[in-house]
Image (tube, rainbow, N blue to C red):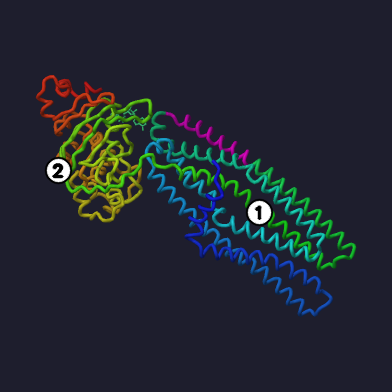
């Protein structure tokens, strides 16, 4: 993908110029000062050389002090410029990082299943890092140095037109060559970025699965894969560095040739008494000053190769739109809504149907138990309700509203979900339970914690609700973590509750002690329970039995229980586990 000049400008405008224009202005002034000081310094020294023997010692000393002051000022301005440039770059890249994070968090699950978290971390951080120099110095430095080169060449033309003309031709030739080679390294650096992203994806995946890897003796296999990814990065980086070195050396070679020729010309002019020693020194320094900015332009252009790769990948990510269009209707539920699936068909991959013609209606405030073999599509039903995916055809309704028309944020606000996998965050108990919502009072939290039987656990914590938890849930059993997930739903105060194997990690005694808490949680709320025990089905109002993504049976539990030929009845007779195993 090619990033257009308009897109480069757009990024500069959004992340640097618009939000930081005073800082950018200051940076431009500092860079111009720095460039001016660089020009001034040799001029003062040249004048000093010319004065020797023709003026008083005092005037010479003043000239020397002026030279030192300029050199000192150059260092100070350089220091401030570096600070301001770094600051500008950090502010801009952090702004871009947060925009990318927000964008990724809002992308659909299909995208997240295609990209590992490690890969995304590398894209949000690593690729953005490539833009630091582009954001802070690229434009100002490039323009400043081009201006400097032009200024010096003009000045040289006034001193000696032959030398000025010669250097102008050399400079145009060198800059033309630089522009021609500036993109040669881009595909090679692109490979480095991709290899690094893959490596981070691998690393994240395997570090998260350390327990599994160790338990199954797969550590050496993981290390082999590690070496494979590390080797791929090394090879890609080696190639990119090699090509960069070749282009860099070519440019340097051109600089050396043009510098050598210029010095030969200075020697010729001086030996033929066409210039004096002071002028020869000034010309020498000015020639040097044409070379340095050209080197700086070269460095900026090489750096631009990496910025281009970073920007290409960032643009690709930002241009990836959500395949699920957000609705625009708000959803404010004061009471539990009814839920309905109308002829819903769905598949993750186009060729494999996962749900086929699923139709059922759950009245408001009632509980539905879904059963079915592994892979029959139970979890998929709940994912569609959250609109993490959208059906290929058919309609899902919450109350009277078509799910497609409702704002995603409101759907998430209206539904509470407890699954087998509980994600904890590196944050306090309070933040883990409120999910960073500061409006939920502590009293409410403590009440919910006590209700699920975690009161003694809370009392044992050294800092109560302020105690820090880790994502691994250190100090918590899997069952306790699941109870915390229940508390989250309690305090969210939702109208629809989905329990997907919510008590799978609890022992029978704890599960039994939770009956009351569950009854409280579900009272007056529309509930879907993915059931794995017959006992759970005894507590629901409706039963849905799924088989290979199709409805085998749906109806009111009491009616199905009375019907001798119903499948539900055969489940009760044979035992759910035996039939569905
Ligand atoms: N993200 C996904 N991408 C592709 N296929 C998927 C994805 N998630 C689930 N599937 C497939 O969809 C089918 C239904 O999966 P689902 O998780 O809904 O079944 P389930 O009845 O909840 O199973 P379990 O009881 O094991 O949780 C399965 O064949 C599964 O392999």
Q: Is residue 533 above or below residue 265?
A: above
Which residue corresponds to the image point at 51% horizontal and 57% vertical from the top-left?
A: 16
Of 99 and 226, nearer the camera is 99
**Chain part drawn in magenta:** 217-240
Residue that sits furthest to the left in the current view? 562
Circle 1 sits in a helix, a strand or a loop, which is it? helix
Residue 483 horizontal/vertical position (percent): 24, 42
Residue 446 horizontal/vertical position (percent): 21, 51
Check disc 2 and report the residue beneath it. 524
Which residue corresponds to the image point at 84% horizontal and 56% vertical from the top-left?
A: 264
Residue 349: which numbered mark, if any? none
Quick one: label 1, few (<14), some, or many (20+) residues within 10 Å?
Answer: many
Residue 256 is left or right of residue 564, and the answer is: right
Residue 40 is left or right of residue 138, and the answer is: right
Residue 84 horizontal/vertical position (percent): 54, 62
Which residue corresponds to the image point at 85% horizontal and 68% vertical from the top-left?
A: 276
Secondary structure mostly seen in the magenta stretch: helix
59 in magenta? no
């Amino acid at each position: 993908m090619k990033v257009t000049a308009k897109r480069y400008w757009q990024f500069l405008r959004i992340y640097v110029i618009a939000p930081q224009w005073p800082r950018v202005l200051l940076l431009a002034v500092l860079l111009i000062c720095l460039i001016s000081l660089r020009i001034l310094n040799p001029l003062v020294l040249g004048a000093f050389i010319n004065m020797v023997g023709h003026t008083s010692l005092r005037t010479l000393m003043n000239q020397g002090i002026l030279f030192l002051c300029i050199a000192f000022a150059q260092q100070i301005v350089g220091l401030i410029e570096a600070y301001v440039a770094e600051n500008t770059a950090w502010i801009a890249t952090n702004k871009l990082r947060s925009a990318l994070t927000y964008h990724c968090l809002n992308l659909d699950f299909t995208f997240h299943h295609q990209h590992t978290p490690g890969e995304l971390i590398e894209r949000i951080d690593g690729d953005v890092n490539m833009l630091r120099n582009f954001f802070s110095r690229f434009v100002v430095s490039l323009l400043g140095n081009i201006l400097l080169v032009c200024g010096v060449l003009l000045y040289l033309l006034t001193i000696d037109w032959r030398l000025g003309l010669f250097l102008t031709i050399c400079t145009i030739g060198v800059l033309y060559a630089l522009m021609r080679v500036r993109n040669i390294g881009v595909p090679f650096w692109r490979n480095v970025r991709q290899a690094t992203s893959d490596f981070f994806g691998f690393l994240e995946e395997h570090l998260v699965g350390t327990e599994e890897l160790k338990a199954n003796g797969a550590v050496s296999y993981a290390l082999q894969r590690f070496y494979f990814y590390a080797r791929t990065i090394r090879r890609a980086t080696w190639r990119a560095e090699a090509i960069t070195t070749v282009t860099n050396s070519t440019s340097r070679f051109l600089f050396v040739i043009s510098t050598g020729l210029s010095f030969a010309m200075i020697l010729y002019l001086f030996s033929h008494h066409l210039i004096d020693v002071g002028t020869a020194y000034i010309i020498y320094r000015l020639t040097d000053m044409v070379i340095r900015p050209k080197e700086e332009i070269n460095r900026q252009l090489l750096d631009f190769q990496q910025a281009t790769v970073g920007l290409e990948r960032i643009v690709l990510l930002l241009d990836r739109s959500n395949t699920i269009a957000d609705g625009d209707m708000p959803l404010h539920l004061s009471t539990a809504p009814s839920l309905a699936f109308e002829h819903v068909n769905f598949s993750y991959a186009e060729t494999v149907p996962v749900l086929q013609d699923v139709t059922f209606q759950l009245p408001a405030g009632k509980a539905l138990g879904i059963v079915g073999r592994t892979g029959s599509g139970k979890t998929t039903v709940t994912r569609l309700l959250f609109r993490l995916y959208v059906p290929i055809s058919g309609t899902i309704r919450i109350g009277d509203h078509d799910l497609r028309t409702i704002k995603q944020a409101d759907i998430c606000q209206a539904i509470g979900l407890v699954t087998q996998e509980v994600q904890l965050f590196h944050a306090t108990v309070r933040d883990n339970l409120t999910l960073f919502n500061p409006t939920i009072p502590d009293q409410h939290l403590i009440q919910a914690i006590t209700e699920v039987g975690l009161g003694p656990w809370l009392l044992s914590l050294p800092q109560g609700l302020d105690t820090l938890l880790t994502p691994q849930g250190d100090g918590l059993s899997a069952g306790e973590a699941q109870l915390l997930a229940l508390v989250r739903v309690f305090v969210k105060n939702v109208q629809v509750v989905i329990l997907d194997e919510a008590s799978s990690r609890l022992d029978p005694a704890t599960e039994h002690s939770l009956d009351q808490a569950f009854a409280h949680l579900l009272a007056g709320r529309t509930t879907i329970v993915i059931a794995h025990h017959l006992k759970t089905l005894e507590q629901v109002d409706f039963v849905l039995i799924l088989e290979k993504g199709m409805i085998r049976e749906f109806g009111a539990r009491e009616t199905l229980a009375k019907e001798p030929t119903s499948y539900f009845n055969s489940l009760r007779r044979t035992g759910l586990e035996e039939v569905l195993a």
